[in-house]
Amino acid sequence: MSTVADKLAKKSSSKTSAKQVRLRLVYVDFWSAVKLSFLAAVALAIVTIVGAFLVFMVLQTTGMITRLDDLFKAFDDNFVLSDYIGLSQVMAFSAIVAILNLIVVTVLGAVVAGIYNLMVKVTGGLLVGFTSN
């Protein structure tokens, strides 16, 4: 039983000076995918926390928070935005978002590896070509 990938591999069998190897990816190790997705999630968490800090510092330095305070005081004299948006609140919120992203991205990596391993049984895997230069 030949697949479309096998037919394409036969069509592109032109002679080249570099040795070409075609391999089929038929299994993704579950724990390796979990570890890799966890590391990607850690990097995303660091970017989230640093980005939130930088955005807050830019907003505070440019005076946008005080301008929004003045805008909200026009509607309600008792509401002060800077009581709710401080550095500690912003960093706590970004830390919570980073932890939730850490969990979600790690679980998604595991789910994608599991789904790929199930779909390989139907599709036969992913044909990958390598060459030595």
Image: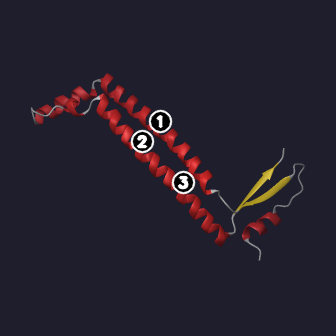
Residue bearing the label numbered 2: 98
Q: Callout 3: few (<14), some (14-19), or many (20+) C-alpha neighbours within 10 Å? A: many
22 to 41, vertically: above or below: below
Residue 59: x and y, percent?
Answer: 32, 28
Q: Residues within 10 Å of mark 2 (few under 14, many from 20)?
A: many
| Element at label 2 | helix
Residue at 74% x, 66% y: name it: 5
Q: Residue at x 85, y 61 (%)?
A: 13
Q: At numbered mark 1, what does the secondary structure look like: helix, strand or loop?
A: helix
In the picture of the structure, the residue carrying the numbered disc 1 is 46
Q: Residue at x 11, y 36 (%)?
A: 75
As drawn, the residue found furthest toward the left would be 77
Q: Position of residue 72 (x, y in %)?
A: 16, 34
* Mark 1 crowd level (few <14, some 14–19, many ≥20, 10 Å Cα): some
Check disc 3 and report the residue beneath it.
Answer: 109
Image location of residue 87, percent across then percent down: 31, 28
Measure the C-alpha gap from mark 3 to mark 1: 18 Å
Provide residue 100's location: percent of width, then percent of height: 41, 47
The residue lying furthest to the front in this view is 31
Three-letter amino acid code of the residue under disc 1 = Ile
* CA–CA distance in space, label 3 to label 2: 16 Å
Q: Earlier in the sequence, mark 3 or mark 2?
A: 2
Q: Are marks 2 and 1 in contact (CB under 8 Å)?
A: yes
Q: Residue at x 69, y 65 (%)?
A: 125
Q: Amino acid at mark 3?
A: Gly
Q: Mark 2 is on which residue type?
A: Ala
